[in-house]
Amino acid sequence: MKQKIVIKVEMSSDKCRTKAMKIAATTYGVSSVAIQGSDNDQLVVSGQDVDSANLTRSLRKKLCYATILSVEEVKDNAESTEEKVPEPPNPVEIDFSQFPVCNCQPYHQPYPKYYEVVYDPYQNNCSIM
């Protein structure tokens, strides 16, 4: 369900407005965020299945004051007037007889050596080393 949420937030500076918009934009399901109102104190959020209580709680934690003014369901005119079902594309048949057949054996590379035993020709019988 697509919805439009209007939240009143105390935003006294540009820094607070930016912070509020970042919090709203990172919330799950939000598609657009705008600021409106006479004092630019209303945050308008629209999106699909947005949790308005969770969003308001996040704004309260970061900015101190936030209240939900309205939550409305938005219906698109294009969706409600005409629901079109796309037709599946016709399958294309390919004639494989026209392609040459490869009778090659795949080449397998030998396994790489991961270790090799090294002998020291000058054995030193020193017990310190």
Image (tube, rainbow, N blue to C red):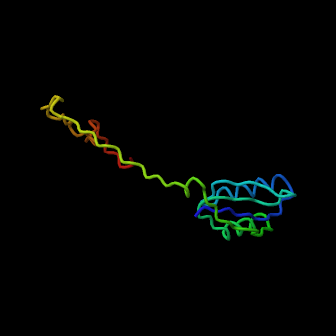
Residue at left offset 47%, top offset 52%: 84
Q: Is residue 8 above or below residue 78?
A: below
Figure quadrant of residue 70? bottom right
Is residue 46 toward the left or the right of residue 15 in the image? Answer: left
Is residue 100 toward the left or the right of residue 73 in the image? Answer: left
State the count of labels. Answer: 0
Instruction: Out of 73 and 14, give the one closest to the viewer.
Output: 73
- Residue that sits furthest to the front in the current view: 81
Instruction: Out of 67 and 63, give the one closest to the viewer.
Output: 67
Residue at left offset 19%, top offset 34%: 95
**What percent of the width, then of the height, locates residue 121?**
26, 36
Instruction: Out of 9 and 83, give the one closest to the viewer.
Output: 83
Figure quadrant of residue 94? top left
Is residue 89 toward the left or the right of residue 26 in the image? Answer: left
**What percent of the width, then of the height, locates residue 26?**
64, 57
**What percent of the width, then of the height, locates residue 22?**
70, 55
Figure quadrant of residue 107? top left
Residue at left offset 58%, top offset 64%: 1
- Residue that sits furthest to the left in the current view: 103
**What percent of the width, then of the height, locates residue 3?**
64, 63
